[in-house]
Structure formats: C-alpha cells, structure tokens
Image: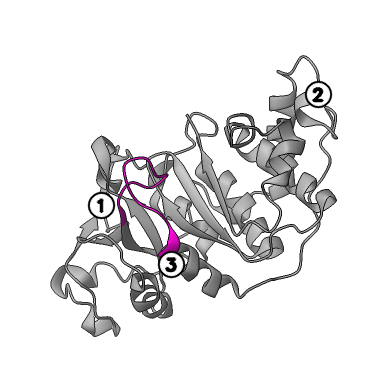
C-alpha cells in the first residue's frame, strides 16, 4: 500500500508528542503484525479507555500532523491491535480499486448462493448499482466525534473497551488498510477493497471510521438515508459489503427491506465478519 510519511516513530523518543504539537497521554506504539514486527509503528493508542471529549481533544490535533483518530477495542479475551494478526504487507492501495466494481462482485457472489431473492427484495440477482448521495445532516467530523463520545462500551457492547488510537492515513476510510486490519479476512483477504467502498461512502454519505475491533467496524454517518427508496439502495450496498449485517442484524428485521428501515436517519453503521 502507498504510504505517507509516518510521524509515529517520533513518539518513541517523544512520548508526549510535543515536538509534533500534540499533548498525548501515556500510550503504546504498535508495530506487531502476523509476519513479525513492522519496520515502523502502525498506530499509537492511549493506555486508558476513551472518555467523552477524548476524540476531540486528541483526534483533531493528530489529524493536523497526518494522524487520524479511531477507537480500538482492547476489551475481553481478544486483546488489542497487537493481537489481531495485522497484515499491512498484504494490503494494496484503496485508490487502486473501484467501489462499484467491488460491491458488484460481492453482490454477485452472495446472491449466487441464494435459492431465491426474497432476502434481497426489492432487488433481484442483478446488482442494482450504487445508491445516490444524500444531503449532509451534519459536519462529518463533528458527527464522528459525537458518535465516538456516545459509543457504548462494556461486555455486551459492540466495542468492549474503546481506546483512542492515532493512525497515519490519508483519509478516515483508509485507516483499516493503513494498519493492515484483518477483520474481514474470511470475506476478502485484501482490506483495501473494503476501504475502497468506505471511500465511496465518505464521498456520498459523509462516513468516518470511528471504531475497530478484531472483526468489527463502526462508522459514523453524516448523511444517512431519509426515504425508503434511499434506505433500500443503501441496504443493498450493506448486503454486498457485509452480508451478516443484514441477515443477522436486529431482531425483527425482515430481509433487506426490514434492514433498510433501521437505516432511516441512523447516524452510525456497524459491521462484523465471522
């Protein structure tokens, strides 16, 4: 993957980040990958769990020096990023992939396994195309900070123990690729293809990558769908992107149509891959 100059090595000798214009709390640099230590740190994360206001206090200054914020899950038995089996060496560049081509390929593969298309109604086996962009309801970065502050942590939460991390990345959508995240590895071995879709969602829906777990992705949404037609078009993309989010989502949803109802005005989207 194409990389930017990485400011993180500076933190090895300057843990507070003052030389970068930062005021960081005690934290940890992570260079552990499934192939052994990476030549440079992939991310920094705070030792203490995030609290309301942490994202704004650390994320905005970090972004000014090329370090973008994301919450990482250090809770439970799954460990943190150093235990996730990161594979940055096997990750391509998100800009080398076309989001619609990626989603169309996913859609074709998933619908080929369906006996009928009741689960994906009102669409059939044929990929319906990208959903149209929707109007921003909030500033994307402001919405991300709000979602980060409101994200529930705990044993039964999507993210058990959220810690603020800083990642050298061009844009929020590239964060998973920048660290070689392997959350969707059983669905796609190159997370840059996932990030190509996230880039498109950044452009059309004002998303930001807010949190990562071992196999969980949470994004904030500044321009969620507001009509049934918009929501169903977005739901089709979600089905292609992460089928389990649709087929194993909230109790009581009925296929893609039922899932689409949960997207109306919803400022956060959550995905997970087995």
Which of the 4 quarters of the picture holds residue 216? top left
Q: Earlier in the sequence, mark 1 or mark 3?
A: 3
Task: Give the number of the mark in front: 3 or 2.
Answer: 2
Q: Earlier in the sequence, mark 2 or mark 1?
A: 1
Q: Main secondary structure of the magenta part?
A: loop
In-front residue for pair 129/257 = 257
In-front residue for pair 209/224 = 224
Q: CA distance from mark 3 to mark 2?
A: 44 Å
Determine whether the residue tagged by mark 3 lies in a helix, strand or loop: loop
| Horizontal side, residue 48 vs residue 66: left or right | left
- Let me know if residue 172 appears in the view: yes
Residue identifier under label 2: 117
Q: CA distance from mark 2 to mark 1?
A: 44 Å
Q: CA distance from mark 1 to mark 3?
A: 16 Å
Residue identifier under label 3: 4
Determine whether the residue tagged by mark 1 lies in a helix, strand or loop: loop
Determine whether the residue tagged by mark 2 lies in a helix, strand or loop: loop
Direction top: furthest residue: 115
User: Is 51 above or below relative to 139?
Assistant: above
Direction front: furthest residue: 252
Residue at coordinates 44% horizontally, 39% vertically from top-left?
A: 183
Residue identifier under label 1: 31
Residue at coordinates 27% horizontally, 45% vertically from top-left?
A: 75
In the rendered image, residue 46 lying in the magenta stretch gets the answer no
Residue 161 lies, in percent from the top left, at 30, 51
Circles 2, 1 touching at the beta carbon (< 8 Å)? no
User: Is 216 above or below relative to 3?
Assistant: above
Q: Residues within 10 Å of mark 1 (few under 14, many from 20)?
A: some
Q: Which residues are magenta?
A: 149-162
Residue at coordinates 28% horizontally, 81% vertically from top-left?
A: 22
């Amino acid at each position: 993957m194409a990389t930017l100059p990485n400011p993180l090595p500076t933190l090895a000798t300057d843990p507070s980040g003052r030389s970068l214009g930062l005021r960081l709390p005690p934290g940890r640099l992570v260079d552990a990958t499934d192939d052994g230590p990476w030549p440079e740190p992939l991310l920094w994360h705070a030792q203490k769990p995030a609290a309301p206001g942490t994202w704004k206090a650390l994320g905005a200054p970090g972004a000014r020096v090329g370090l973008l914020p994301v919450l990482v899950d250090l809770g439970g038995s799954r460990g943190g990023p150093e235990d996730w089996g990161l594979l940055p060496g096997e990750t391509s560049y998100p800009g080398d992939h076309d989001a619609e081509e990626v989603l169309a390929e996913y859609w074709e593969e998933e619908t080929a396994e369906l006996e009928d298309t009741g689960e994906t109604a009102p669409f059939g086996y044929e990929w319906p195309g990208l959903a149209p962009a929707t109007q921003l309801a909030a500033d994307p970065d402001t919405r991300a900070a709000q979602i980060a502050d409101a994200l529930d942590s705990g044993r039964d939460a999507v993210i058990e123990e959220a810690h603020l991390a800083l990642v050298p990345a061009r844009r929020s959508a590239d964060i998973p690729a920048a660290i070689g995240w392997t959350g969707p590895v059983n669905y796609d071995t190159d997370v840059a293809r996932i990030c190509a879709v996230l880039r498109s969602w950044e452009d059309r829906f004002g998303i930001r990558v807010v949190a990562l777990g071992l196999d969980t992705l949470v994004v904030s949404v500044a321009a969620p769908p507001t009509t049934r037609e918009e929501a169903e078009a977005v739901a089709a993309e979600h089905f292609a992107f992460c089928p389990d989010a649709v087929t194993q989502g909230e109790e009581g949803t009925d296929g893609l149509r039922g899932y689409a109802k949960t997207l109306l005005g919803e400022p956060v989207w959550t995905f997970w891959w087995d």
